[in-house]
């Protein structure tokens, strides 16, 4: 039976981590409660030895009153007003705490199980108090304590876990380590809702990560989360995801345009143009936006404001590029490159870009960092010359369909490869030999077409 159970457990663990691999970095340490039962038993024993617990009918309970009355300790630090709240205890503890037979075993209704005696047929492990299983909260404290020791900087979890779970974790861990700072900061995340309702199988509005990834990329999901405060409720909806998709497109367009500007041929001196008032103003704004992003992240990790500052920086950069092109002047390559590098680094920090791509979002499947632009660049240059030759002939012969087809290559096909190809005002120059060959090809096609029309007319 245990072998079958382990196979089932392993199947779901592997399935779970395959999905997680697509959206988050791998964990440094993975723990399973069933592997930490000896550590949990020792954890409970020390709490008893320190005087903060008691045995009752084969179970062990935490003495909240004694802990709260002891010097240097305080119970329910996170939500003190919830102490004695029967509804909160019912939601958090269930029958482990507030059923009639459980209440008779405890000194106070606020006390919670560290170790629970098992009934016949229930999972159980040997302990000094008889066969039983860990309480709900103790497993987290024992596993985290065995890895991180007597203190940790940041503890995450949902907003609804503040009481009783996290408050009880704090109490039993500080009772074990005899300190008052087991966790320095808690990050309690907001709920994820669907159309304003909490996800629930009974409401049939439950969406798995796998389902979400079938509709959107991991980057789009991450951007949707980053565009909202981590501590507020996030409503998963078409509008929410559309906002993330548009943000991604907006940033991607900027990266593609900068790459196109950097590909424009120039000698080494052309990379260091004198800064005029426009460049000085954009650079000033660049530093102001970097400072604003830093301040937003220092203010309770405000990613929403940080992304808005980054959006504003791109808008200003786009306006600068448009003004320079309108004046028939080249934008400053080095300044735009610095801005693009900064934005790319920030997206890497946020987990929205993986790999070593110097600028912009990598092209490829999730988790890949293949630089397709570098791969296709030799062919892109040839295609660019060919495309300009076709466009030149088409303009002269007024063949609009050919021009439209060239635009499809530029606007639809190449951006999918992570490449922006811009038309310059005069077009690209091509050799006389290339022009001659293209003209002959066009004239031959035109001759065949005219002969086809003439044949049809004679036949009718």
Image: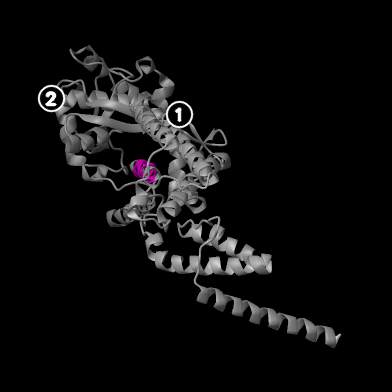
Number of the front mark, 2 or 1? 1
Residue 9 inside the magenta-drawn segment: no
Q: Secondary structure at mark 1?
A: loop
Residue extent of the magenta highlight: 337-348
Q: CA distance from mark 2 to mark 1?
A: 41 Å
For the point 43% across and 34% down, which residue is it?
Answer: 277
- Residue 164: x, y in percent? 35, 25
> Which residue is labeled 2 in the image?
49
Which quarter of the rendering shows the N terminus? bottom left
Q: Secondary structure at mark 2?
A: helix
- Residue 387: x, y in percent? 54, 67
Location of residue 255 with respect to 62 vertically, above or below: below
Residue 91 or 18: which is nearer the viewer? 18
Is 163 left, or right, of 458 in this rendering? left
Determine crowd level at label 2: few under 14, some 14-19, many 20+ residues with C-alpha closer than 10 A.
few
Residue occupying the far right of the picture: 460
Is 43 left, or right, of 164 in this rendering? left
Is 179 left, or right, of 91 in this rendering? left
> Which residue is labeled 1 in the image?
232
Q: In the rendered image, is residue 97 in sight?
A: no
Q: In the rendered image, is residue 322 in sight?
A: yes
């Amino acid at each position: 039976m245990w072998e079958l159970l382990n196979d089932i457990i392993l199947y779901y663990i592997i399935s779970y981590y395959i999905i997680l691999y697509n959206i988050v970095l791998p964990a440094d340490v993975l723990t399973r409660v069933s592997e930490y039962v000896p550590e949990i038993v020792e954890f409970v024993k020390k709490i008893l030895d320190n005087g903060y617990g008691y045995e009752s009918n084969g179970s062990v309970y935490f003495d909240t009153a004694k802990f709260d009355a002891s010097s240097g300790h305080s119970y329910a630090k996170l939500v003190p007003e919830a102490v004695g709240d029967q509804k909160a205890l019912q939601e958090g503890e269930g029958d482990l705490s507030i059923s009639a037979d459980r209440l008779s075993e405890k000194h106070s209704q606020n006390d919670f199980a560290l170790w629970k005696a098992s009934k016949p047929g229930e999972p159980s492990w040997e302990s000094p108090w008889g066969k039983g299983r860990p309480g709900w909260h103790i497993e987290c404290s024992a596993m985290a304590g065995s890895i991180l020791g007597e203190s940790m900087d940041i503890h995450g979890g949902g907003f609804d876990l503040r009481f009783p779970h996290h408050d009880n974790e704090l109490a039993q861990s500080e009772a074990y380590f005899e300190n008052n700072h087991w966790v320095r900061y808690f990050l309690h995340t907001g709920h994820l809702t669907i159309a304003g309702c909490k996800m629930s199988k009974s409401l049939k509005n439950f969406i798995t990560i796998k389902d979400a990834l079938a509709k959107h990329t991991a980057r789009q999901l991450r951007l949707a989360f980053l565009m909202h405060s981590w501590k507020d409720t996030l409503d998963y909806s078409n509008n929410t995801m559309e906002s993330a998709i548009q943000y991604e497109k907006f940033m991607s367009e900027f990266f593609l345009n900068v790459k196109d500007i950097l590909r424009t041929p120039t000698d080494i001196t052309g990379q260091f143009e004198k800064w005029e008032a426009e460049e000085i103003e954009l650079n000033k704004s660049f530093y102001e936006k970097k400072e604003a992003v830093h301040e937003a992240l220092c203010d309770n990790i405000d990613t929403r404001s940080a992304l808005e500052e980054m959006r504003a920086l791109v808008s200003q950069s786009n306006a600068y590029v448009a003004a320079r092109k309108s004046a028939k002047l080249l934008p400053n390559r080095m300044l735009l490159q610095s801005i693009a590098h900064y934005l790319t680094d920030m997206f890497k920090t946020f987990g929205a870009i993986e790999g070593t791509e110097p600028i912009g979002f990598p092209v490829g499947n999730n988790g890949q960092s293949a630089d397709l632009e570098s791969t296709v660049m030799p062919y892109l240059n040839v295609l660019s010359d060919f495309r300009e030759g076709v466009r030149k002939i088409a303009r002269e012969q007024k063949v609009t369909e050919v021009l439209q087809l060239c635009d499809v290559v530029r606007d639809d096909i190449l951006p999918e490869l992570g490449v922006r190809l811009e038309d310059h005002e005069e077009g690209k120059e091509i050799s006389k030999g290339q022009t001659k060959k293209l003209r002959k090809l066009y004239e031959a096609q035109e001759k065949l077409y005219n002969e086809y029309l003439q044949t049809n007319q004679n036949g009718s």
